[in-house]
Image: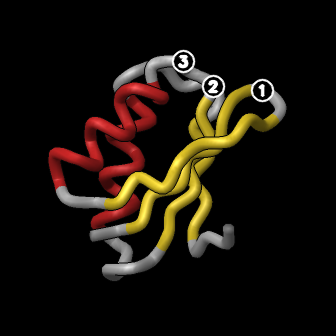
Amino acid sequence: MDWDVELDCLGLLCPLPVLRARKRLLGMTAGQVLRVLASDKMAAIDLPHFCVEVGHDYLGASAIEGGSAYLIRRG
């Protein structure tokens, strides 16, 4: 899947990946997709939970070198 913006949070610990994703999503338009790169294992729990709370679509995750890539569609 394609994305519009990529956010590198590799090496950052909870809650920074979610906080930075939140800030980046605020500057995006509805329907755009954010790709978040994170190495913190808690991002796998925190990012989907964040999306449910604020109304974004969590599109899933995939493994990358050094962590995971999470896709979020701005609601």
Which mark, residue 66? Answer: 1
Q: Residue reaching furthest left?
A: 53
Element class at badge 1: loop
Q: At 35% from the left edge and 25% from the top edge, which residue is drawn?
A: 15
Q: Residue reaching furthest right?
A: 65
Quadrant of the rendering where the N terminus is positioned? bottom right
In the image, what residue type sits under mark 1?
Gly
Q: Which residue is mark 2?
A: 39
Element class at badge 3: loop
As measured in the structure, the alpha-carbon distance from the residue carrying label 2 to the one carrying label 1 is 6 Å
In the image, what residue type sits under mark 2?
Ser
Q: At 54% from the left edge and 18% from the top edge, which residue is drawn?
A: 41
Q: Residues within 10 Å of mark 2 (few under 14, many from 20)?
A: many
x, y (%) of residue 49? 28, 36
As measured in the structure, the alpha-carbon distance from the residue carrying label 3 to the one carrying label 2 is 6 Å
As measured in the structure, the alpha-carbon distance from the residue carrying label 1 to the one carrying label 3 is 11 Å
In the image, what residue type sits under mark 3?
Lys
